[in-house]
Image (cartoon, grey):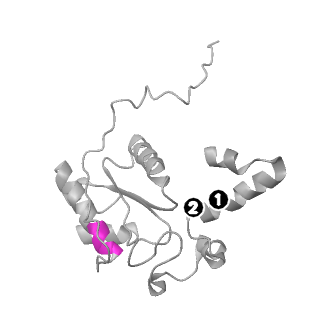
Amino acid sequence: MTQKKDIDATSNKFLRGKYAIAGIGETGYVRGSGRTTKALGTEAVRKAMQDAGLKPGDVDGMLSYSFNDSTFTPNIAGELGIRPNFYMDVYGGGSSIEALIGIAMGVIEAGMCNTVAIFRAMNGYSQVRIGGTGDRSAVRPLNGGSLFSRGYGLMSAGQMFCQSFMRHMYDYGTTPEQVASV
C-alpha cells in the first residue's frame, strides 16, 4: 500500500521558472484616441509579438477580458493572422489579468497551446468609461451578463460590490471603516 500525499495548492514548485512574460505591447494613453478597441488591441498585441520576437504563426492561444467595453479575440487574431488553437474572452474587471495568466499556464500545461497572447483594449475616455460616463452611442446593446448589471446602473466594480458589502454590514454589523480596510 502506498501513502497518499496531500497536494499543497499554495506551492508553485512545479511551475517555478517554467513560464515567462516574453513581450509587452502598449498603445499611447491619450484622451479621445479616435480609434476603435479593435485597432488598439491589434496594435498592442502586434507590439508585444515584436517585443518577444514572435511571428503570427508562433502564437497559438489568445486570452482577453473586458467589461462590455472591448473587442473580441477572434477580431484581433484575424487582423494579425493568428490562428489560435485556444482562445477565451472573459467578462470581468481589473482583477482578471492574473487569472488569465494562470489560465494561459494551464492551457500550455494541457498541451493545447505553446504561446499565448493576453490583451485588454478599451477606450475609457471616448467610449465606455468605468463608472458609467462617456458616449452612450458607443455602448453595446444590453445582453448576457449586462442585462443584470448595466440595466440597473452597475457599471464599475465599486457599484457592483457595494451591494454585497451593504448586505454584509446589515447582517453582521460591519462598520464602513472595517469594509474600507478590505
**Residue at the front extreme of this rendering:** 177
Across and down, in percent, residue 164 comes to: 71, 57
Q: Is residue 41 magenta?
A: yes
Instruction: Please name the residue that numbered disc 1 is placed on.
Output: 161
Question: Hey, what amino acid is under mark 2?
Answer: Ala
Q: Mark 2 highlights which residue?
A: 157
Give the CA distance from mark 2 to mark 1.
Answer: 6 Å
Tell me if mark 2 has few (under 14), some (14-19) or many (20+) residues whose alpha carbon lies within 10 angstroms of its own. Answer: some
Rendered position, 129 above or below 157: below
* Label 1: few (<14), some (14–19) or many (≥20) C-alpha neighbours in 10 Å: few
Q: Which one is nearer the viewer's eye here, 107 or 70?
A: 70
Q: Is residue 12 above or below residue 95?
A: above
Q: Residue furthest top?
A: 1
Residue 81 in view (yes/no): no
Q: Residue drawn 61% across and 70% down?
A: 154
Residue 91 coordinates in the image, percent (x, y): 52, 63
Rendered image quadrant of residue 147? bottom right
Specify the principal SS of the magenta part.
helix
- Callout 2–callout 1 Cβ contact below 8 Å: yes
Q: Magenta region: which residues?
A: 37-42
> In terms of image quadrants, where is residue 65?
bottom left
Which is more toward the observer, 68 or 103? 68
Report the amino acid beneath label 1. Answer: Phe
Q: Residue at x 30, y 44 (%)?
A: 21
Q: Residue at x 58, y 78 (%)?
A: 143
